[in-house]
Each structure stands twice: as C-alpha cells, then as structure tokens.
Amino acid sequence: MSLAINVFKQIPDPNVHLYNTFIRACVQNSHSLLAFETFFEMQRNGLFADNFTYPFLLKACNGQSWLPLVKMIHNHLEKYGFFQDLFVPNSLIDSYCKCGLSGVKSAMRLFKVMDERDVVSWNSMIRGLLKVGELSEACKLFDEMPMKDAVSWNTILDGYVKAGEMNKAFGLFESMPERNVVSWSTMVSGYCKAGDMEMARMLFDRMPVKNLVSWTIIVSGYAVKGLAKDAIRSFEQMEEAGLKPDDGTVISILASCAESGLLGLGKRVHTSIERIRYKCSVNVSNALVDMYAKCGQVDRALSLFNGMSKKDLVSWNCMLQGLAMHGNGEKALQLFSIMREEGFRPDKVTLVAVLCACVHAGFVDEGIRYFNNMERDYGIVPHIEHYGCMVDLLGRGGRLKEAYRLVQSMPLEPNVVIWGTLLGACRMHNAVGLAEEVLDCLFKLEPSDPGNYSLLSNIFASAGDWSSVANVRLQMKNFGIQKPSGASSIEVDDEVHEFTVFDKSHPKSDKIYQMINRLGLDLKRVHVVPKVNRTVFPMHRWKLCFTHEQYDDIKEGEHHPEFSSWCQVTLGIKQEKQPARPELGSRQCQAPIELSQEELKKVAIAVQNEDNDEENNKQ
C-alpha cells in the first residue's frame, strides 16, 4: 500500500477514475481516514465525485464515531441526485446500520421514504435492527417483506438464535421454503450454545451438505461442553471426509479447548496441523500458545512461543497471561522486559497480564509503579480490569485500607468483581469490619447472590463470631436464598468428569464413594488444628484443608465434589497416560488436596481387587 500511495502522489492531475481507484484501495486496506482525506483533496481540486465514489467511502464507515461522515455523504447524495441508482441508498442504509442505535434510526427514516426498495434494502434494514437488539421490530419488517430470499430467512433465523429463542428458531427453520448449509449451521450453532448437544448432533447428522464451518461448530460445541471424546471423534470424522482445517477452524477449536481445558483435543488438533502444514501462521501459533497455557502446560506453551519465527503483540500477551495465571509472576515480568526491548508497545491486555503477574509474585511496589505510570509510559488509561488487579494486589499484600481508598477514588463505577476481590482480601486477613462495609456495597449490586452471604458467613466463622454466622444463615432462610452446590471437574483420558455434592449420576459413582468412605475413615482418626481462616486436618496419608463449613458438611456425611474428582483420578489412572488435571470450580468450596499418585494407585488397586474378589465369589 505504501508503494501505491507514493505512485498516486506522483500523478500530476489524477482524474475521477484514478481517485476512485485509490479511494477503493485505501478502504480495502483499512486506511479509512486516508480514503476521506483523498476525497476532500479531490473536492479541493474541483473534481466532483460520481456514483462510484460514495459507496467506496461508505464502506469505510463502521462504528458510532463515523455517523457524522455517513450523514455528510447522505447530504451529498441528495444534493447531487444520486438516489436514482438503488445501489446508492442501499449502501447508505447498510452504513447507517453499522453506526449503532442512532445510525439504525437514521437508516429506518431513509428506508421509509425510499420510492423503491429491493430485497437488499429489506435485508439490510432487518440486519441493522437485529444488530442493536430490536428482534421484535426486525420480525415485523420480515413479515411485511413482499419477497424473501434465502438471506432474509437466514438473517431472521440468526436473530432468533442469538437471542436464545431456540423454540421460535426451530419453528421458523421447519417452515423455511428452502434451507441451505447456512440455515443448518445456524441451528446447530444455536443448540451448541444452548448446551443441547443431543439436538445439535441430530440436526448436524440430518444436514444434506456439510462444510468446514459446520464441522467446526459441532467440534467446538463438544469441546465447550467438555465432551472430549465426542469432540475428538468429530474432528477425526471431519478429516476422514476430506476436509482440511483452515486457520479459522483451528483457531475456533483451540479457543474452545482453552475455554474448557480440553488438553487432549488441543493436542490432537496440534498433531493434525503439524501433519498437513510446513509451518503455522502467527494466528494459529498464538492460539496454540494460548491453549497450552490455559490448559496448564506452561512449559509447552513457552517452548512454542520461543520457537515462533514471527511474533505479534497477541503472541506476547498470550504468553504473559499464561505465565501470570499459573503463578509464574517473576518469569512474566522478565518476559515483559524482553518484549519492550524488542520494540513491542504494550496495550491494555498486556498491562492486565503484567499487573496479574505482580499479584501472583507478591511484587506490590512494582505493581503500583506499573499502574501509576501506565498512562504516562504507554498512553493507556486504566480500565476496570486494571483497577481489579490493583485491588487484588493491595489486598493480598495486607494493605486493605489502600485498596479500599483506591476503590472509593477510582473514576469508574466499581462492579461486583472489584467489590468481590476486596471482600476476598478481607476474608484472607480477617478484616471483619471492612468486610461488612464492602458487603453493603455488594448487596446493593447483587442483593440475591448467595455467594455474598456465604462469604460473610465464612468471615464471621473465621473470627469465631458464631452468633453472627447464625444471623446470616437465618437471613438467607428468610429471604429464600440457597447456596448452590459447588462443582468440580477433571479430565481423565480425554474425558471431562464433573461432580457436585451428593452426585450419584456418574457411571463409577459406587467405586468413587467407596474411595470417599476410605478417606472418611482416615478423617475420623485425626484431630482438628485451627489455622487462620481454615481448619486443617493433617492426615497420615493425605493432606486436606477444609473450611469450617466444609468440615461440618463432612461430619454430616456430605461428599464434596473435590473428593469425587480426585477419586475419579484414581479410578481412571492407567499406565502411559497423561496426568489428570483437576479443576476445582466452586468459589465457596476451594479445598486444596495434596495426594500422592502412588498412594492413589494403591487405593485404586485395593478397590479393584475387592471387585475381583466379589466377582470370583459370585462365580
């Protein structure tokens, strides 16, 4: 593009055709401002734009800030009589609809006064209404359409799906006069996002024609749900069908793996990439680094990152986030220094990762310095995420008063994450008085969130204030608020298992509970040792830490999901398999469990031997 700019500047007297060609090139290469500068230069040189110039300029307008320029072009089009060509007002409607709610209102005014409309006019207007969440208005317009094409049906179908109206979407889908691969893929995607993989698969299997997008949707859907074996099987079926995953497919599936922690599928996709490609694009490499980092394979992520021949800012951000989220704060800050030395300018995502690294490394003063200087050094105004990191940093460091002052003085409205982070720090340091003030603010934002009440109860319990604990429990009962069951998940042999309290749905429930009972027998033989805000129960084989509330639950016979997850590790252990990775997902039920795999294997063998003895006795 730089060469084209130099050539164009050397032309002594460009005509309208040359100006149009250059403006179009600017728009196609995302140089929108240069396109308008060229347009204004063209006017200064006494040349009049034609019916090709304005549609090129309109394509450059995308976003609320471009609305004044769209209105300016609208005035020019009316003034010079270009509305006779239907292509021009259609382009204008499309551009208005890209400029937010105000733009959509302007588009609707234009649409209503148009002498002639074609199916493109109707489709653009419906798409614009859906973009700003006006589903009912879009449906009314759809019903009024004199003639509908496949785009019309698919547009309104997509509107229902994005609004989560799957029953209405299915009704419309069944009544469509003609369905193409987009229609089918939209429905499959909708059911995947709704978590109904059975319905998604049923429709997917009914599809007369499947393309790469369809396969990507179903594989990603299984991955997000944690159904690793189904995801891997579908990915292999896609390859057997002769479809090679492109960058979009690979990135989408890897993002799903990163979201749900499916390391097995991520590795399978990585193997496929290495088999069919000589080298990965930067975007695919970034997705791989992100997937391995979020799945806990930080060393593998770092190895891939170091092996990248070309890196962009996203590459550095992925690696920084991966190191920070897994407690490698010092390494993350070292990497940040290298990044700056190589000439990369950090963005707001980078600074979130840096502050997060300071949190996990305990570098309070360094974190404060980065935060205070981010606007001066990098031109980045602190966002809510940066304030959240700072509250966490100060809170963990025991500087609760500073954290509270920061929340009170921040120019943004504190959200539940900010107050929740401060509350967690109060619990960590037994700051009961401040915790009550923070909870008042949380209750105003989330009056019915059971997590807030549970946290307050635990803080009082940690301070030994049992009467206040009873009052909180009574309040929850009076308001009809129940604490949701905690859940934990774990991936064993490419399959994710999720457990909740009293869970009996797992096919290995009987064996899992046998193992839990064995742990319970050990628990009965140990004494109670208070420690800060937890009660610690040292065991001769396992170390398990529980809160007071958790200990009460265990005494009452409740089985916590962490037990179930770890017992599933034991029952699923086989030789030459990747280590199982537990995800302890409950906010109120965070019990760190340190277990030796050798010990787990012994228990598993004992259970399996008992099963074998039972089978032999039956025979």
Image (tube, rainbow, N blue to C red):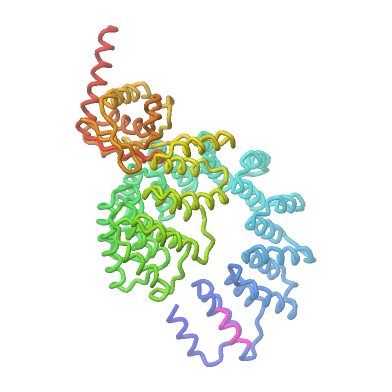
Q: Nearer the viewer, residue 537 or 148?
A: 537
Relative to 341, residue 508 above or below: above
Q: Would residue 41 be counted in the magenta stretch?
A: yes
* Residue 20 visible within the image: yes
Res 522 quadrant in image: top left
Count of numbered labels shown in the rendering? 0
Place of residue 187 in the rendered image (x, y in percent of width and height, measured from the top left) = 57, 43
The magenta segment is 35-43
Relative to 115, residue 6 above or below: below
Relative to 521, residue 100 above or below: below
Place of residue 136 in the rendered image (x, y in percent of width and height, measured from the top left) = 71, 50
Relative to 515, residue 385 above or below: below
Q: Is the magenta stretch mostly helix, strand or loop?
A: helix
Res 333 quadrant in image: bottom left
Q: Name the quadrant of the C terminus.
A: top left
Place of residue 37 in the rendered image (x, y in percent of width and height, measured from the top left) = 56, 83
Residue positioned 61% across, 72% down in the render: 66
Q: In the rendered view, does 292 fall on the left or right side of 418?
A: left
Residue positioned 56% across, 91% down in the render: 13
Q: Which of 384 and 207 is in front in this view?
A: 384
